[in-house]
Image (cartoon, rainbow, N blue to C red):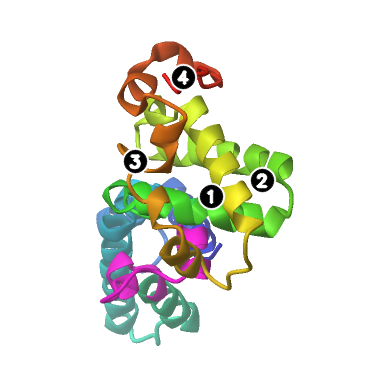
């Protein structure tokens, strides 16, 4: 991933500078300050919840480093421009659109956990589940991958307790069954044809479960619980 490549490369270079800040034609304090800023910024860039401040700080560090090179009468390395372009590409603001993310971008940002947690709502849960099913071509394979990714996403955003085993499996099964009724090119097309999935409280799931009760149940959160015969 671009974000990880930039963060690891710049962070490693900065850490090496911190080990030997003298001997670069500049005050050691200035070099150490720049290197410290880059190490902190690289760490922030690698964490999904702090991509924006990490990218901004790294851009500032690159500008600072380029100015120091010019001060010494040297042209800044070309890698600075390459890294700056890469940082600009991963800035979250560059990804904001007037409409919903397309399937490829939604899937990628869910998988690397760069999608803000507040933007991963019920609709996005359904879309990503559909994408996993479509890509895997099999309910069992899709479920294993989706569960793993969903747990990783929740943990990356500091909310591992939000993962719910029963709801995850139930929605995967419902979506998988509906997928057999027609072929859809996109997740949005699928949801447009199946609007009863969009309401969590009184939609399709409520035919099989008391949604409020199953959502709150500790056992159902930890293991898959079959619906009762009366749906409650």
- SS for tag 2? helix
Q: What residue did someone put label 1 on?
A: 129
Cα distance in 3D space between marks 1 and 2: 8 Å
Depth check, mark 2 against mark 4: the one in front is 4
**Residue placed at 59% from the left, 40% from the top?**
173
Near-viewer residue (214 or 59): 214
- Between discs 1 and 2, the one toward the N terminus: 1
Q: Are marks 2 and 3 in contact (CB under 8 Å)?
A: no
In the depicted view, which residue is nearer to us: 10 or 177?
177
Which dot, 4 or 3, sits closer to the camera? 4
Q: Which residue is mark 2?
A: 142
Callout 1 crowding tier (Cα within 10 Å): few <14, some 14–19, many ≥20 = many
Could you say which disc has been placed on residue 230 in the image? 4
**Cα–Cα span, label 4 and label 3:** 19 Å
Task: Identify the element where label 4 is drawn.
Answer: loop
Marks 4 & 3, CB-CB < 8 Å contact: no
């Amino acid at each position: 991933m671009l974000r990880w490549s930039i963060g690891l490369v710049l962070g490693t270079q900065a850490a090496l500078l911190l080990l030997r800040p003298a001997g670069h034609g500049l005050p050691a304090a200035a070099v150490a300050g720049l290197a410290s800023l880059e190490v902190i910024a690289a760490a922030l860039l690698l964490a999904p919840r702090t991509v924006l401040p990490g990218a901004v700080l790294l851009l500032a560090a690159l500008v600072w480093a380029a100015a120091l090179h010019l001060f010494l009468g040297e042209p800044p390395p070309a890698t600075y421009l390459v890294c700056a372009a890469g940082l600009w590409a991963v800035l979250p603001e560059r990804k904001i659109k007037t409409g919903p993310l397309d399937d490829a971008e939604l899937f990628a940002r869910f998988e690397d956990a760069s999608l803000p947690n507040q933007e991963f709502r019920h609709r996005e849960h359904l879309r990503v589940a559909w994408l996993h099913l479509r890509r895997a071509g099999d309910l069992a394979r899709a479920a294993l991958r989706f569960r793993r990714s969903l747990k990783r996403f929740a943990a990356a955003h500091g909310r591992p307790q939000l993962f719910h085993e029963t709801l995850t499996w139930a929605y995967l099964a419902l979506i998988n069954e509906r997928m057999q009724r027609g072929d859809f090119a996109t997740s949005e097309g699928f949801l447009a044809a199946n609007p009863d999935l969009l309401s969590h409280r009184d939609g399709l799931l409520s035919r099989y479960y008391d949604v409020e009760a199953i959502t709150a149940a500790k056992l159902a959160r930890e293991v898959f619980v079959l619906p009762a015969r009366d749906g409650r």
